[in-house]
Image (cartoon, rainbow, N blue to C red):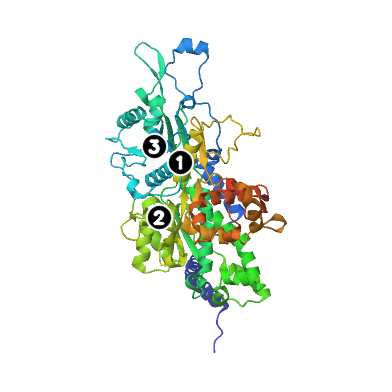
């Protein structure tokens, strides 16, 4: 047999490698792409994400300055007044709001002192969204309780709030309606971004035919105080602007979502499939990015600081924890041995599905129908939950889950979307105590709960402060000024409605789950969240006695349901005062900090 030439052998091997190497590379990349469905959040990726955000002018940190007092066109000096002839200057803080709580007919007096102006010519009060939430808050304030009677949703009802809308959608017609309402009403509530342009133009400095400068008000406009919700006007003493810390409500929702998954592990953790969440937004703008970032931080806190405590207690055979999460042991793919503890924690950690580039997580619009492709991508990757930060595109998520009969639920955004039957016709129905008694009755709902911009609650607080003629410089009987983080702004101020003043919250259907998450949270020094709650609850609100933690999320308790906004404020107080040490992968800056400060430093969506 002839010897084979070594050169021929070498050439043959090289040829084979050259043929199969590209195929090997392609297959390897494909395998890795298929394998890496989830985002790993760490210090390095967050720093890169923040650089990207700053580069694109998406740094929104400056928006979160709480109740910063602004110089809204301050009164000119005498010399300036003589030179510029600025006239017709108004300051709403000096108005007589005529709200006297000792008045015999004080409910009527409340009603007749205020109005709501809708944000378009075809708006309706029952819009299943912000206007309805605001209207409910005004009616509850008028009645001095938490009741809502739909008979009051008429603008001539005995105890209803007065409401109206412009006849056409232009600045001129908006200003005309402001002028008309201001002839009779003292405080005018405005909800929606369509008010921003006409309000801005009202505050402009103008020059008349004689060359005299004046601050423009449309006739009677300056005789009333205006409260703009979910917007920012910074040029007018007559306007209180209120924006919302959506990242804080999203943070609470992220934790609640993880608890919902963990409590139902037998449904979502099957066939070795990891429990995972898909997050997407409509347009890549700051308000959407920080909302999505809040969800991520909630999932992070759950995985790193709550889940390990739950798993540890199950290892210790704690009966209460086993009762809270009865399905964990039987659904685990790893044996429950102490040497496997880390594996089990990783197995039940909630993953965030990554679609690659950050921009891949945005549909590009807020138009219903444009997010179907994104929803399909998440469902193809076995998403257990989907969180659309894209307005009406929540309908895309609900419909596609129904079409595929997928084992997946949806989290609502901004309003209590589970109350509106999005799964059918987007009609609105108020939930009653009876419907809220047992959340287990709602387990078949695709929309479980929602992150809230708690407009109704803020409207009530704003009215209470104005009725007392509250302003920035007052002090209480002990000589203390109001805490800006807990206060709602007065006229001539802007503020952020946040978890501390009840403006950012989770809907009531999610309250049970977020509280179950915090039940297993420990602060530095092994101080338990439960113990901190019980220490603070008795003296937190003198008017409303808050219950101990064991009863603070009881679905059968009407008192908790009616006052859960205040319960949310106590939750915020704890998150703002108690400290946790975060690892390098979790935070930028100091490792030991409060949860709210941690959120302030890490508010971007980075997956």
- Among the 4 quarters of the image, the one containing residue 436: bottom left
Residue at the image point whose x is 48% and y is 48% from the top: 289
Q: Is residue 469 visible?
A: yes
Q: Residue at x 45, y 44 (%)?
A: 455
Q: How far is disc 3 from disc 2 in space, using C-alphas? A: 32 Å
Which badge, 1 or 2, is on the more N-terminal residue?
2
Q: Which mark is residue 45?
A: none
Q: Quadrant of the rendered structure where residue 419 is?
A: bottom left
Which image quadrant: the N terminus?
bottom right
Residue 575 placement (x, y as % from top left): 61, 50
Q: Picture coordinates of residue 351 (x, y %)?
A: 53, 63
Q: Is residue 355 visible?
A: no
Q: Relative to residue 52, is residue 323 depicted above or below? A: below
| Distance (Cα) linking label 1 and label 3 | 18 Å
SS of the residue under disc 2: loop
Between label 1 and label 2, give the one nearer the viewer. Answer: 1
User: Is the Cβ of the residue at disc 1 closer than 8 Å to that at disc 3?
Assistant: no
Residue ID for mark 1: 459
Residue 482, given in percent of the width and then of the height, sits at 59, 36
Label located before the other in sequence (1 or 3): 3
Q: Secondary structure at mark 1?
A: helix
- Specify which label sits upstream in the sequence, 3 or 2: 3
Q: Residue at x 49, y 38 (%)?
A: 464
Q: Are marks 3 and 2 in contact (CB under 8 Å)?
A: no
* Other residues around mark 3 within 10 Å, as few (<14) / some (14–19) / many (≥20): some
* Residue behind mark 2: 417
Above or below, comparing residue 375 to residue 9 in the picture: above
- Rendered location of residue 331, percent (x, y): 54, 75
> Residue at the right extreme?
525
Q: Which mark is residue 108?
A: 3
């Amino acid at each position: 047999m002839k010897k084979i030439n070594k050169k021929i052998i070498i050439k043959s091997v090289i040829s084979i490698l050259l043929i199969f190497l590209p195929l090997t590379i392609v297959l390897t990349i494909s395998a890795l792409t298929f394998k890496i469905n989830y985002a790993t959040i760490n210090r390095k990726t967050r720093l890169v994400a923040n650089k990207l955000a700053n580069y694109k002018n998406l740094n929104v940190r400056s928006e979160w300055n709480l109740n910063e007092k602004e110089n809204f066109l301050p009164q000119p000096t005498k010399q300036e007044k003589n030179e510029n002839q600025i006239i017709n200057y108004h300051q709403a803080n000096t108005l007589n709001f005529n709200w006297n709580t000792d008045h015999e007919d004080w409910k009527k007096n409340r009603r007749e002192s205020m109005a709501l102006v809708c944000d378009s010519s075809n708006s309706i009060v029952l819009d299943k969204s912000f206007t309805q939430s605001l209207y409910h808050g005004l009616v509850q304030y008028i009645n001095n309780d938490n009741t809502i009677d739909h008979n009051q949703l008429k603008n001539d009802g005995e105890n209803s709030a007065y409401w109206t809308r412009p006849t056409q959608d232009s600045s001129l017609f908006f200003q005309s309606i402001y002028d008309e309402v201001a002839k009779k009403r003292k405080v005018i509530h405005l909800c929606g971004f369509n008010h921003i342009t006409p309000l801005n133009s009202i505050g402009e400095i103008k020059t008349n035919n004689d060359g005299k400068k004046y601050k423009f008000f449309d006739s009677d406009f300056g005789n009333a105080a205006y409260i703009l919700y979910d917007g920012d006007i910074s040029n007018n003493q007559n306007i209180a602007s209120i924006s919302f810390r959506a990242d804080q409500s999203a943070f609470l929702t992220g934790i609640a979502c993880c608890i919902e998954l963990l409590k139902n592990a037998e449904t979502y953790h099957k066939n070795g499939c990891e429990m995972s969440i898909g997050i997407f937004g409509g347009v890549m703008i700051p308000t959407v990015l920080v909302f999505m970032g809040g969800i991520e931080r909630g999932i992070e806190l759950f995985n790193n600081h709550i889940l390990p405590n739950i798993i540890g207690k199950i290892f210790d055979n704690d009966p209460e924890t086993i009762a809270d999460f009865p399905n964990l042991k039987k659904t685990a793919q790893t044996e429950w041995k102490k040497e496997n503890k880390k594996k089990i924690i990783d197995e039940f950690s909630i993953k965030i599905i990554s679609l690659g580039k950050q921009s891949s997580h945005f549909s590009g619009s807020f138009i219903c129908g444009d997010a179907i492709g994104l929803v399909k991508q998440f469902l193809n990757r076995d998403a257990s939950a989907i969180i659309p930060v894209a307005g009406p595109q929540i309908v895309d998520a609900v419909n596609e889950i129904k079409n595929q009969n997928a084992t997946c639920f949806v989290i609502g955004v901004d309003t209590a979307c589970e109350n509106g039957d999005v799964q059918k016709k987007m009609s609105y129905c108020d939930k009653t105590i009876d419907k809220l008694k047992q959340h287990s009755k709602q387990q078949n709902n695709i929309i479980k709960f929602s992150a809230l911009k708690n407009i109704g609650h803020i409207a009530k607080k704003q009215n209470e402060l104005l009725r007392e003629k509250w302003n920035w410089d007052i002090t209480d009987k002990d000589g203390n000024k109001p805490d800006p983080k807990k206060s709602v702004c007065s006229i001539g101020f802007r503020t952020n409605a946040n978890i501390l003043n009840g403006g950012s919250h989770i809907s009531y259907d999610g309250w049970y789950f977020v509280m179950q998450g915090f039940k297993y949270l420990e602060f530095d020094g092994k101080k338990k969240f439960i113990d901190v709650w019980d220490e603070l609850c008795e003296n937190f609100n003198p008017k409303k006695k808050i219950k101990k933690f064991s009863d603070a999320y009881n679905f059968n308790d009407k008192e908790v349901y009616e006052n859960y906004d205040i319960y949310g404020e106590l939750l915020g107080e704890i998150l703002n005062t108690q400290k946790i040490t975060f690892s390098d992968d979790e935070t930028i800056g100091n490792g030991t900090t409060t949860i709210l400060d941690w959120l302030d430093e890490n508010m971007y969506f980075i997956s």
